[in-house]
Amino acid sequence: MNALTRMTCCALSLAAPGLLVAEPGQWSSVAADSELGFAAYYEGEELPGRFAAFGVKLETDEVTGVPTALLVEVQTGSADMKDREVNAEIVEPEWFDARSFPTASFESRDIRPAESGFLAIGRLRLKGIEQTLEIPLDWRQEGGSATLSGSVTLSRHAWDVGTGEWSNNASLSDRVDVRWRVTLSPAD
């Protein structure tokens, strides 16, 4: 990194502490300190769940240190709604179809500054269906670690999650809220 680039990174870090990183690089999620949760709504009540197995990779710009690319991979069979019967059901073809589609992913190479944080525009792949999605991100870096957090509301019908008897919205809402807080460390 040349002297001008170092000075630019330092100036940007001082101008917006906690939002920009002084060092560019590759970041990977720390599984033990990261959460990816979701909430479905049944007869108006929130039914929380989480994915126990997922990974996040983030790239930052060489000069500014802001996020430029994001890859999230989720093991669909790791969905946990804290109920053994429900957990056995949600991996079936009507829901996540974890046997046929063991991984869901979101990939973005278009991350833009937004009113608060950033906006990642990318493609979500779930159950063999791929669609463009915009996801708000909050990126914070301190020392040798960083956090990426946010939330987004999705339509389960858009990805054929909850088909068959669950395809109407009579008792189970089409709305699913997804929330995350991911701790990242520099990738090796």
Image: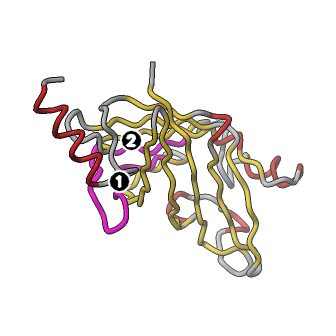
Residue for point 33% across, 46% down: 20
Contact (Cβ within 8 Å) of mark 2 with mark 1: yes
Q: Position of residue 119 (x, y in %)?
A: 34, 58
Q: Which residue is mark 1?
A: 120
Which residue is nearer to you in this view: 68 or 106?
68
User: What sort of colour scheme is used for the picture?
Assistant: secondary structure
Q: Which residue is mark 2?
A: 70
Which residue is nearer to you in this view: 173 or 120?
120
- Residue range in magenta is 104-125
Crowding around mark 1 (Cα neighbors within 10 Å: few <14, some 14 to 19, many 20+) is many
- Between the C-alphas of marks 2 and 1, the distance is 8 Å
What quarter of the picture does the N terminus occupy?
top left
Q: Earlier in the sequence, mark 2 or mark 1?
A: 2
Three-letter amino acid code of the residue under disc 1? Ala
153 drawn magenta: no
Quarter of the figure with residue 9 = top left
Task: Classify mark 1: helix, strand or loop.
Answer: strand
Give the side of residue 89 with respect to residue 10, left or right. right
Residue for point 52% across, 67% down: 153
Three-letter amino acid code of the residue under disc 2? Leu
What quarter of the picture does the C terminus occupy?
top left
Q: Position of residue 14 (x, y in %)?
A: 28, 49
Task: Classify mark 2: helix, strand or loop.
Answer: strand
Residue for point 16% across, 40% down: 8
Q: Main secondary structure of the magenta part?
A: strand
Q: Position of residue 183 (x, y in %)?
A: 55, 41
Residue for point 71% across, 68% down: 166
Which residue is nearer to you in this view: 154 or 36?
36
Give the side of residue 27 with respect to residue 62, left or right. right
Which residue is nearer to you in this view: 113 or 69?
113
105 drawn magenta: yes
